[in-house]
Image (cartoon, helix red, strand yellow):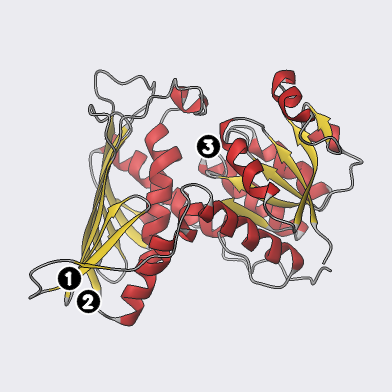
Amino acid sequence: MTPMRLIVVGLGARARTWLAVISDNPDVDIVGLCDPDPAARDRLAGQYPKAVMGAGLVDMIGVAADAVLLCTPPEGRAALVETCCRHGLAILAEKPLADDMATAETCVEMAESAGVPLIVGLNFRFLPVTQAMIRLFAEGTVGRPAFARFTYERWRDGTLPHLNKYPLTMDQPMLWEQSVHHFDLMRFVYGAEPVRVYARTFNPPWSMYRGDANVSAILDFDGGLCVNYQGTWQGNWDNLGFEWRTDCTEGVVVQQEMFGALRYARRDDRHLRDVPLEAHVQWITDAAALLASFVTTWRGSTPPQCTGRDHLRSLQMLEACILSSGRGEAVELAELPQLATRAEFPLQQRS
């Protein structure tokens, strides 16, 4: 089959990982590279001599392409999505799709009206540990999930050169840049939608972030599942703390590391049992699987995963957390503006 001709927009920290993943995929050819920083373009010119270089996506008009990878900050995404839709280019966008709910929904509606795939880069769905947890629940080994505790405690030095700098000035950096992954995982793994959120967001006195780097929330899902969530980017110990424990009707499931260490126990077990996981290269294996899914969606051979429409459900959880923190009381998701329900774009076979 003909490889997908891809334009990469934004050549910063996240793009470095994507470029490595794309280079290992024979089904994708990079035909354009965009960044407003000439130095960023110059660094890659020698590696991609056949790619057209430009400051922005508008410089790529006329380049024969099939799809665009948006590695840009979420601010200003609407204009990029509009350009892609106008030229019939499939879109893979880094999360979050936008930095506010209204803009994200506008992007989704533009893509649906244009009939182009809009996929959001929720790569954690493709982790072997995530897939194994879904299978464990589906097999009924420990029964049905009833309540959970999800903790993510990190000292994230936002000044490090390999990290994007825009989160330093965001209003809610933890929610929009990190918790969005966690909330999406909850929806994906449990197969449930949130109905109520009681949250507080805040900043510790030593925080380097302008906006709130801490989130505490009680998340109620349909079916009665309740998750106690704590996340921070400014935990004052430079050691990543991660644990996702789900108590079920017949036992527990515990993920003890962000990329692995999945275990379970039935009620009377003395010790946790290891769940075998497929081999995984951090940040690479999951991104490679996401890219492969994007290519098959573009070709029309598989239904889309991580769609913009589905992503809006997770963004609503962020909005509910912000509203709840401001009010000091729980927020029903039904209070928020209702999302339209539309069919995904029709699959069209490509060779």
Number of residues whose C-alpha sits closer than 10 Å to that of mark 1, classed few (under 14), some (14–19) or many (20 or more): some
Quadrant of the drawing holding the N terminus:
bottom right
Residue 265 numbered mark, or none: 1
Mark nearer the viewer, 2 or 3? 2
Looking at the rendered structure, the kind of residue marked 1 is Ala
Q: Is residue 195 above or below residue 7?
A: below
Residue 191 in sight from this viewpoint: no
Residue 322 lies, in percent from the top left, at 36, 39
Classify residue 5 as left or right of residue 72. Answer: right
Q: Which callout, 3 or 1, points at the residue further toward the start of the chain?
A: 3
What residue do we see at 33% from left, 30% from top? Answer: 213
Residue 183 in sight from this viewpoint: yes
Residue position for label 2: 142
Residue position for label 3: 99
Q: Secondary structure at mark 3?
A: loop
Residue 72 numbered mark, or none: none
Mark 2–mark 1 contact, CB under 8 Å? yes
Q: Is residue 151 above or below residue 167?
A: below
Q: Secondary structure at mark 1?
A: strand
Looking at the rendered structure, the kind of residue marked 3 is Asp
Looking at the rendered structure, the kind of residue marked 2 is Val
Distance of mark 2 from mark 3, alpha carbons? 38 Å
